[in-house]
Image (cartoon, grey):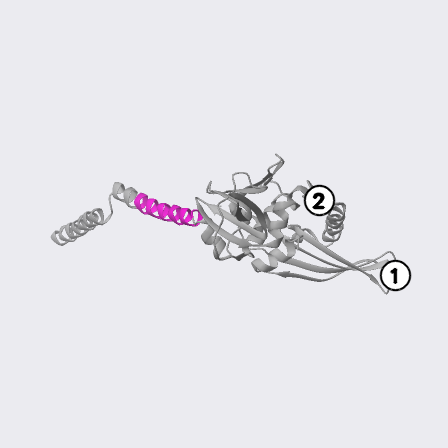
Amino acid sequence: MKKKLYVLFCILFLVNITVVFAKQEVPNQDFINKYFFDVNLINSASQMAETKKNINQPFLEQLVKHSLEHNDVQNIKVENNSGLQRVFSINDGFQERVLRKVVYWLNNSVRVNGTIEVSLDNPSNKSTLKMANDEVITIEPAYLCVVDNKRKTCTAKEGELIVSENGQKVRLKSQSLYDWLMVGWRKELDGPTKEELLEEALFSRYLYHLGPSYSEFFMCPKIKIDPINGDPRRHLIFASALNYSGHHGGDYDKLTFSVRDSNLTGLQVTNVKIKKHISQEEIEKQCRTFD
C-alpha cells in the first residue's frame, strides 16, 4: 500500500513540475502581440521607405541613366504660344502610346554640353510632364540668343531641347522629340486608325482559334500577311502579341504563331510559341508604332 502511495505521489509531483515549467516557457500573449506588431511595423516601414526611394528618384538622374519609365508619368500637357493645348493621360489606353514614345525619345536622346540659355517667358511650344510623385517636368526648345544693338533676338536651336526639374536644367538633342513638340503633338489621333482596327480585328479572329488558354495575349497585336504563291485567296499570316497581365507590373510574355488562311482549306494554325520574360527592348519594339 505504501509503495502504491509512493508511486502515486511521484507521478503527481512530476506532473506538477512539468506544468510549472511549461507555464514559464510559454511567452506572455502581450509580449507575442507586441513582438509581431513591431516586426510587421519595421517590415512595413522598410517597404514604404524603399518604395518612396524609387518614386522620389530625381527625373534628371533617371534621364541621364536612360532609365525613365512611362508608367511614372501621369500625363503630358503640350501647349503653344497661340493658346492651343492638349493633354495625354496614362489612364487612357490609346493616349498611353503617346507617353510611351515621348519617354522612348527621352531615353534615346543625347546630352548636349555647353551653355544653356535662360528659358523664354513665352516659348513657342512647351510640354509639361506630371509625374507620379507630383513632380512637374518641363520640356521646351533650346534657344540661341544673339544681342545686336542692345536688342536680343532668340531663335529655336534645331533638334535641341531644354528639360527642367526644380530649377535644374539639362540640354538634350532629339530630333524626333523636337519635331513632335513643335508640330507632331497637334496631329496625334484621338483613336486608332482604320488600319489598326483592322489589324486588331484580324488578330482577335485568329487568336480565337488558339483556345481560351491564350486569351490574355492581346496587348500590342501585330500581324503580317503574305499571299501564298501570289494567290489573293490564300494567305500566310504571322501574328504576335503580349500578355495583358504584364501591364500590371509583372513580366511580359510574347505569343507568336502562324496561320495558313485559305478559302479552300480553311484555317491552319502552326508554330504557336510563348517567349517568357521578354526584355524591355523587345517590349518597345512590339508596341512601338513610331520611328
Closest to the camera, between mark 2 and mark 1, is: 2
Q: Residue 113's spot in the image, x, y percent?
A: 49, 57
Q: Which mark is residue 275?
A: none
Q: Earlier in the sequence, mark 2 or mark 1?
A: 2
Residue 100 colored magenta? no
Residue type highlighted by circle 1: Asp
Q: Residue furthest top?
A: 83
Q: Nearer the viewer, residue 168 or 96?
A: 168
Residue occupying the point 49% across, 48% down: 117
Residue furthest bottom as drawn: 229
Residue under circle 2? 192
Quadrant hosting residue 186: top right
Indicate whether 196 appears above or below 240. Answer: above
Q: Nearer the viewer, residue 274 or 60?
A: 60
Mark 2 is surrounded, within 10 Å at the Cα level, by few (under 14), some (14 to 19) or many (20 or more) other residues, namely few
Residue placed under numbered mark 1 in the picture? 231
Residue range in magenta is 36-56
